[in-house]
Amino acid sequence: MPATWWRTAVIYEVYVRSFADGDGDGVGDLIGLRERLPHLRDLGVDAIWLTPFFRSPMVDGGYDVADYRDVDPSFGTLADFDAMLADAHALGLRVIIDVVPNHTSSEHAWFTQALQSLPGDPARQRYHFRPPTPDGLPPNDWESVFGGPAWTQVPDGEWYLHLFDPAQPDLNWDNPDVRVEFEDVLRFWLDRGVDGFRVDVAHGMVKAAGYPAAGLTGQIGLLGRRVLPYFDQDGVHEIHKAWRKILDSYPGERMAVAEAWASTAQRLARYTAPDELHQAFNFEFLQANWADPAAVRASIDSCIHAAESVGAPTTWVLSNHDVRRHVTRLGSLERANAAALLMLALPGSAYLYQGDELGLPEVLDLPDDARQDPVWFRSGGTDPGRDGCRVPIPWRAAAPAFGFSPTGAAWLPQPPAFAELAADRSSTVELYREALRLRRSLTGPLRWHESPDGVLDFSRDGLRCVVNLSRTACTLPDMPDSEVVLASRPIDGGALPADTAVWIFARTARSS
Ligand code: NOJ
C-alpha cells in the first residue's frame, strides 16, 4: 500500500441496510456485508465506507444516531462489526465509517434529558433551544433541508433547531460537552481499528452567533449552495483541526473525508487544508451538466486546481445514497459507463456507490406506502426523496430477493429488471474491475488534447482517455503503437460511437 493510500484510493460506499442481509429480516446488516466482502476485493476497491450502523430509530436511515458507540440490533452487534473489520483488513480492504456530529437522534440520551429539563438547564445547552418570538413564532426563518421550518416547539414553549428532520436535533458545538464527547467517539472507533471517517454535514456544526435570519425565499435542496448562517461558518474549521490531530495520533494513516457544501471551490478547499480533513466530496463533479461536455471539462479543471491549492487530492463521485443514480440522471447505461470510465481515469481518489458496478438505475416507481425517506414525508409526498437509489442490491438473478436476503425479504421492493443487473449477470461489473485494475498504473497529471465539440480527450501517463459525449460518432485519434484496452461498450474499428469512452494505452506503457 503506498504511504498516502487515500490520495489515489477507490472507495466504495456501502449503504449498509441495502447491501446484503445476513439474517433474513429484509434489512442489510454486518453479517451480510461480511459475506460479500470478497466481491469488493475482487472488484479491486481499496476501501469501503459504511453509512451509519449505530443505534438509531432509523427516521433518516441511521443518520439519526441514538448511541454512537453501539451497533443497531437491526445491523448486528459490536462483535459482528469487529469480525467484519478483521475480515476486511485480511482481504486488504480499509474501512471508513460515518460520523454524524451535526445532530443526534431525538432518542439520544442527551436529548431525552434536555426534554425532561426546564428552559435554561445545562442539559438544554447541548442543543439549540430558543424561546419563541414575542408573537410566539419560531426564533427565525431557518428552513429544514428536508422541507418545512427548522424549528420544532416543545410543550413548555421553547423551540429546538433541526436542520434536517425534527427527529434530528442539532447539537450546540459551542458547548464543550459536545466537543469532548465526539473526540471520545472518534477514539472509540479508531481504537477498534477503523481506517477513518466520513464526516456527515461537516460544514454544519457551527451556527452564526445570534441566529440571524437567513432571508430565504425558498427551500434549500440537499444539493443547495446558498450562503447561509448555519452552513460553512468559519468556526467549523477549528473542530476539523482538532479531529485531524486525533487521526494523526494513530498509526496506519487514518483519514477523514468531509461531506461539506460551500459556496465556492475555494471555501470548500479549506476543509482539506493540510491540518484539516484529508478529502472532501466533490459534489461539483456529481452535479456537472453532462449535456454540456465543455462544462464537465471546466469543472474537472477547476476541481483539480482548487484541491492542488491546498495540496489535497481531488475526489470524484457520480452517485451516492442521496442522489438519483447516474444511470438514470445521465439518461442511459451507455452514457453512465462512459462517465465512469472518464471518472476512473482522473487523478485523485474516486468514490463508487454500491450498485454502480452493476449499472443499477434509480427505481422510479416504488409504491408510496413503501417509501421511508423523511424527504417524502416532509414534502407532503411532492418530492419522492432518496429511496429510489437505496433499493436492496441484486446479487443473484435467480434467487429470492435476487440474493439480497436468504428469506427473500427486502425492506424496499426490487423491480424485476434487477434480474439482468444482478452481480452474477451484469455486464458492467467486468468493466469496473478492469478499469480499477488498469487505473493502478496511473500516477501522473492530466493533460488535455484538442478534440471536437462534445468529445473529451486527455492523457495520463501511458493512458489516453477519449469520451464521446456528443450525439454522433467521432474518429479515434490516430495513435501508432497503441491499442484500445478498455471500452465502455464494444466498438468497431476507428470510430467511437456517441456515449462511449475508451482507454487507449501505448503498447509499451500498458501494464498487464
Ligand atoms: C447527509 C447524508 O448523506 C444524508 O443521507 C442525511 O440525510 C443528511 N446528511 C443528514 O444527516
Image (spheres, rainbow, N blue to C red):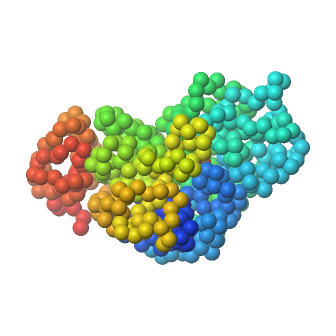
The residue positioned 74% from the left and 54% from the top of the image is: 107
Q: Is residue 240 left or right of residue 287?
A: right
Q: Is residue 261 left or right of residue 473?
A: right
- Viewer-proximal residue among 232 and 403: 403
Which of the image's four quarters has the C terminus? bottom left
Residue 369 at least partly seen: yes
In the rendering, at what x and y percent does residue 44 appear?
Answer: 37, 66
User: How many labels sit on residues?
Assistant: 0
Which of the image's four quarters has the N terminus? bottom left
The residue positioned 37% from the left and 57% from the top of the image is: 416
Tell me where residue 139 sits by quadrant: top right
- Viewer-proximal residue among 149 and 48: 149
In the rendering, at what x and y percent does residue 85 appear?
Answer: 55, 71
In the rendering, at what x and y percent does residue 118 appear?
Answer: 89, 43
- Viewer-proximal residue among 169 and 340: 169
Q: Is residue 111 left or right of residue 352?
A: right
Tell me where residue 228 sits by quadrant: top right
